[in-house]
Amino acid sequence: MNRTAVDAEGAWFEPERITELRRLLPIPYVDVVPVRTDVDGTVTDVGLLLRASGSGRIVRTIISGRVLVHETLREAIARHVEKDLGPMAMPRIPASPTPFTVAEYFPTPGQSLFTDPRQHAISLAYLVPIGGETEPQEDALELAWLPVQELLDSTILDEMEGGHDIVVRRALAHAGVI
């Protein structure tokens, strides 16, 4: 049985129920921009996943996912990093749960800089240095570590969907590299 979310008692919601909840409530999310840093802590590379979008296109994306009931933000970040980059990623999760930005995704294009056709989601965004070995997991087709300047000089960010390009640019600005 395909189950997608946990309720307050720890039981899983059926897909139909989570679809209904997505229509009725804003859903809390975390967006994670995985980065590699040099010995001084300067961001050198950004990790972007390649996966199929909801519209059937193959796109670059960041790590993103729901915060579950009874799950701290730090736990949600760790769970989503492991889910997308593997158990040996060794994320250095921020000591503070304060995000570098908040992205409010709406199902209606034009209502915000961020869109998610499935739902209204409020996402707290984090820049997370990754120190270990990574490889794409689950539905990700590829993970590419792109040098910051190469990423900025290319059209890759412009091809990202839903406003994830804005999240990446804000992460790099927060890190002081643009």
Image (spheres, rainbow, N blue to C red):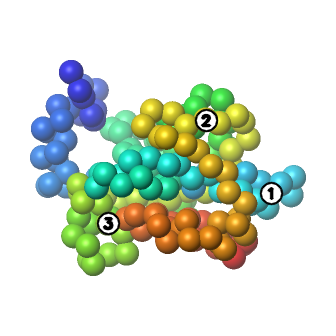
Assign the N terminus to one quadrant of the image. Answer: top left
Residue lying at 21% horizontally and 70% vertically, measured from the top left: 108
> Mark 1 sits on what residue?
41
Name the residue nearer the viewer: 58 or 103.
Answer: 58
Q: Nearer the viewer, mark 3 or mark 1?
A: 3
Q: Earlier in the sequence, mark 1 or mark 2?
A: 1
Query: Could one spot residue 107 in this view of the protein?
Result: yes
> Mark 3 sits on what residue?
115
> Mark 2 sits on what residue?
135
Q: Is residue 116 above or below residue 5?
A: below
Is 150 positioned to the left or the right of 10 in the image?
right
Q: Nearer the viewer, mark 1 or mark 2?
A: 2
Is 65 positioned to the left or the right of 107 in the image?
right
| Residue 99 rendering spot, x and y as whole percentages | 53, 60
Residue lying at 18% horizontally and 35% vertically, measured from the top left: 15
Whole-angstrom CA distance, mark 3 to mark 1, is 32 Å
